[in-house]
Every structure is written in structure tokens, then in C-alpha cells.
Amino acid sequence: MLALAISSGVSVLLPTASLLANRRTVKAEKTHQIIAWLIAIAVISETINLAVYFTEELINTLPLLHLYTVLEFSLLLLVFHYFLEFLTRRRMLLFMGGFVAVELVVITWFQSIYEYNTVVRTLESLVLLVMALLYFRQVLDQMREHNLIRSFAFWFSAAVLLYFSGNLIVFASSNLVRTVSLEINVALWSFHAILNILFNALLAFSLWMKPQTTH
């Protein structure tokens, strides 16, 4: 489990390397610039978590996860905005504002910032899953993209679909499982670590593909 957790954290270097190798595209494409910000935040988050683990300090880093979740959701939604016709600027801002409002309500009345944010992580997964599915429906309806295999939007949406569909049950049940069975909890988070590695690998691959924007 430890080796898998470390591998999951280190896997963020895959899209980092892809961004560095495609600096010209990053400078030209807003979608890639947004992902660069997302990866930078993920690197900082993983570095803090690993540092806390190896120094064996009893520090609760879950408040950072609450902040990371809001930033991750907003940045991923912003990427979808550039190629998903459904996600107009107005709708995107409504989703972002609503998500922040839910986060504030949850941490005020339901889950402390020192608890794993199951409600908000589950909501994030559901909304982003819908966005990914809407993209694939858009592709089927329009059939404008002749070479999907070389499309950034396709691989990015596939990464989001894989990661958040697989993690939906992890995020929704994590707090409950932790109190019921250590073995199931370990298996659940091992599954999460594998999905995180696959997500970063697909994200890295998508950054080599042809950008596609509609806005």
C-alpha cells in the first residue's frame, strides 16, 4: 500500500514532464495553461502530504484537501468550457459558485475541514462525470472531429470519466468504510491510487494531442 501511495503521488510528474516538453503548445493554448496550474497545485499538495508522512508529524492536512477540491473542480470545469458547447461562461460560473456555496455549507454544518470531505468530493465527481459524458454525446451528435485518437479533448474527457467514475464510490463511502473494516479501507484507497496513476498518465498523453476549442 505504501509503495502504491507513493507511486500515485509521484505519477503527477507524468503530466508535468508532458507540459515541459510541450512548452510552445502550453504558451499558445489556454486549456494547457489551465492544466499547468492544476498540475502545479497537485505537485504542491503531494509534496506536502509526502513531507508530512515521512517526517511523521501528527499534522492533519485535510483542510488543504478541502481547498484543493474547490480548485481542482474549478480548473477542470474551466478546461471543459473551452470545448464543450453546453458549458457556456454563464453556466460555468453558476456551477463554480454553486460548488463553493455547497462547500461552505458542508464545512459549516455537516463536515469539519478536519474531516474527509465526502459530500463535496462526491458532488465534484458527479458534476465532472456529467461534463465528460456531455462531451462524448456532443462528439456523437456532431461528428466534426474526424480523428478522435489525436484529439486533446477526447483524451482529457476520457481521463476525467475514468478517474471520477471509479472514485465515485471511494469518495462517497470513505468515512464510513474507515470505521467498519481496515482491509476494505486499504483496498478502497489502493484502488484510488491506481486510478490516480491512470488519470495522470492519460492527462500526460492528452497534452501531446491536437487542442480543440469551441469558445
Image (tube, helix red, strand yellow):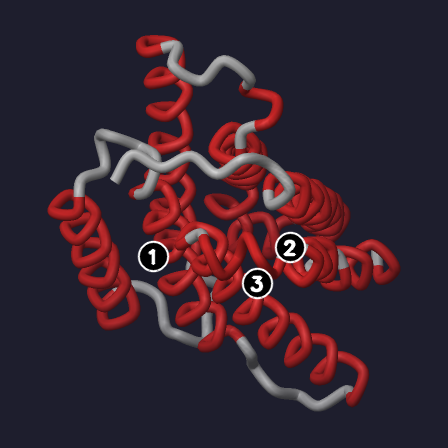
Marks 2 and 3, how far apart in space? Answer: 14 Å
> Looking at the rendering, in which quadrant would you find the N terminus?
bottom right
Q: Position of residue 35 (x, y in %)?
A: 50, 56
Residue position for label 1: 74
- CA neighbours of label 3 inside 10 A, class few (<14), some (14 to 19), many (20+): many
> With 96 as the anchor, is 189 left or right in this view?
right
Which numbered disc covers residue 39? 3
Labels 2 and 3 touching (C-beta < 8 A): no
Residue position for label 2: 22
Q: Depth-wise, is mark 2 or mark 3 nearer the camera?
A: 2
> With 101 as the anchor, is 173 left or right in this view?
right
Q: Position of residue 33 (x, y in %)?
A: 46, 60
Kind of residue indicated by mark 1: Ser
Q: Helix, strand or loop at disc 2?
A: loop
Along the viewing direction, whichever of 93 and 166 lies nearer the viewer:
93
Q: What residue do we see at 66% from left, 47% from top?
A: 204
Kind of residue indicated by mark 3: Ile
Whichever of callouts 2 and 1 sits on the residue coming sooner in the sequence is 2
> With 180 as the anchor, is 128 left or right in this view?
left
Q: What residue do we see at 55% from left, 51% from top?
A: 174
Labels 2 and 1 touching (C-beta < 8 A): no
